[in-house]
Image: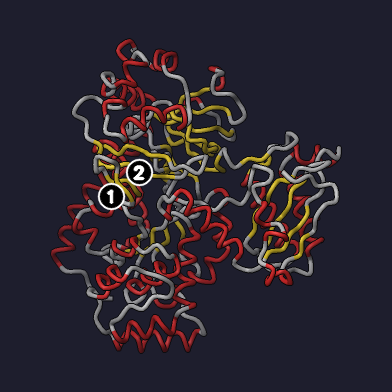
Amino acid sequence: MRPAPWLDTLRLAVATRHARSQYVRFLTSARHGTAVQDRLLKRLVESAATSDFGRDHGFDRIRNYEGFAEQVPIRTYEGLQPYVERAVRGDAGALFAPGRRILMFAMTSGSTNRPKFVPITREFLREYRRGWNVFGVKALLDHPEGFLRPILQVVSPMDEQRTENGVPCGSISGLLAATAKPLVRKYYVNPAATGAIDDPEARYYAIMRFAVPRDVAWMVTASPATAVKLARSAATHAERLIRDVHDGTLSPPGDAPTAVINELRSRLSPEPETARNLTALAQQCGELLPNDYWNLSFLANWTGGTLALHLRDFPHYFGGTPVRDIGLLATEGRVCIPLEDGTAAGVLDVAGTFFEFVDAEADSTDRSAVHRANEVSVGREYRVIMTTHAGFFRYDIEDRVIVRGFLGEAPIVEFLHRGAHVSSMSGEKLTEWQVTTAYRLACDACEVPALEFVLAPVWGDPPFYRLHVEGSSSLASSLTRTMDSELARLNMEYASRRASERLGPLVMNRLPRKFLAAWIMDRQSRWGAANEQFKHQYLLNVPGEARDFRLEQVNSSRRDLVLQVASPRENPV
């Protein structure tokens, strides 16, 4: 490992001092969370008072939180959409005071096949970046060997498309990377141009072509699935990758734009010695794995909710490398910042967003079910409501969290699941977290690998759930029976309805390998937002949504790989 240039060390000292001060302010804000939230709400209301949204909701008459809650109803994106659409068409005054500039619109998946557009202003970007700075400085203080060493950060383009007025629309991660401090950008191993490769196989390979020869200290991805796919790409295409490293070339599998590949190739040069070292590693270890060719300090990605399933693959690729959850971080804003490895729970970022919490199962119109940040209870589950510099007031992001404790007056919250990922055909209110947990426990109990899967509701008499799993298993009946029992243990309503036969038993449908990967790519392409923002859905909540999984819909040449176990009482929807 070569020492960092002395000028970088000096610059780092200055940057670290600034970041440390932000971290100290973060802790101070947490200790005095209620007063910090009061001041923030006052600024947000005053700054938007002359917007159309502010005038429509009487912002000039709001003097305190009680007045704010009286004037502004809690709503989801659909309730804000008319104002957002006007902003997209160029009328920023719909959400902001005159003169406020929208830098871009961040796109993220919506509840339908249409993406959501989040206006990104300078104020919003400043707070978003501050949250990342607090996260980064604490992680690096805990892992100081990561300072001034290569960083693999996967980002998506900030300009996937443009509005009719030329405002870029895409991923906020692209904007953050493009506007990062030069000292930080210097240590990124992954050129931004790799984000312009749509084919995932080619994109993952291109990223790893640049990353594998560098001694990466830490890797930042939103989803842990991305980290696994990157590592798997290098292992699968090890011979090709080593040849490219030796020759200074880039020859990704899959499809990639010629112009992008040529631009990326111009950044490369032959590294025969590195190639020989990689060859020796692959021969010695039997596989080319990040745990062998990198000296990782830590990994940074989501670990909570259903995404924890992907962590099962981490030991194979990354050994015992510590994992730091990046926090509940939505395109619409940051919710919390974890301060330790190995936990998805983080301290609420009270300085950047005004928060409210609604009792998990309650209607948001019930004022008694709505609480300020200092009023929540440890062990209780809530939906998160955000008021942000993006012009979103009392916005229900439909994420469910559980309160694990407090730091001062700021709750420590952990993400459980998206509210939309709930299925209830007979009042069972099955959640995606319960499904992924039950599947993992069932696989462990039956001693079978946890293959890709989707659980889908099926209307019938009675209705039931079908477990679609890739590959074959000689323990199909045992696995479904065990998972059925685990779901009943985790969800008392599911247990009650199974016992009363209002729900039928779980049924398995075995799918060909890579079938679900193709299905996920198809769903992702329908709304076209950034790949890093897309989340695989393990629980469907609309009966008939998995119709493409039916035997008669599968390519006839693959029929021998599919076993369709259908109920004679099933009613197609």
Q: Amino acid at mark 1?
A: Leu
Percent of width and height locating residue 368? 56, 17
Disc assigned to residue 106: 2
Q: How many marks?
A: 2
Judging depth in this view, the residue of 558 and 481 nearest the camera is 558
Res. 199 image quadrant:
bottom left
Q: Is residue 235 visible?
A: yes
The structure residue drawn at horizontal position 37% and vertical position 54%, both measured from the top left corner, is 139
Residue 261 in percent (x, y) is at 30, 72
Tell me if residue 242 comes above or below residue 368 in the rendering: below
Q: Residue at x 40, y 62 (%)?
A: 198
Whether pointer 2 and pointer 1 mark residues with C-beta atoms closer than 8 Å, the reply is yes
Residue 23 can be seen in this image: no
Q: Earlier in the sequence, mark 2 or mark 1?
A: 2
Q: Is residue 555 left or right of residue 520?
A: right
Give the secondary structure at mark 1.
Answer: helix
- Screen quadrant of the N terminus: bottom left
Coloring applied to the structure? secondary structure
The residue lying toward the viewer, choosing from 467 and 181, is 467
Q: Residue at x 59, y 31 (%)?
A: 360
Q: In the image, residue 479 lies at what x, y percent? A: 77, 60
Q: Is residue 463 above or below residue 243?
A: above
Give the structural element (helix, strand or loop) at label 2.
strand
The label shown at residue 175 is: 1
Q: Is residue 166 left or right of residue 374?
A: left
Horizontal relation, residue 7 to residue 312: left or right: left
For marks 2 and 1, give the CA distance: 9 Å
Q: Quadrant of the C terminus?
A: top right
Tell me if mark 1 has few (under 14), some (14-19) or many (20+) residues whose alpha carbon lies within 10 angstroms of its own. Answer: many
Q: Nearer the viewer, residue 153 or 255?
A: 255
What's the amino acid at mark 2? Ala
Of 459 and 435, the residue lying toward us: 459
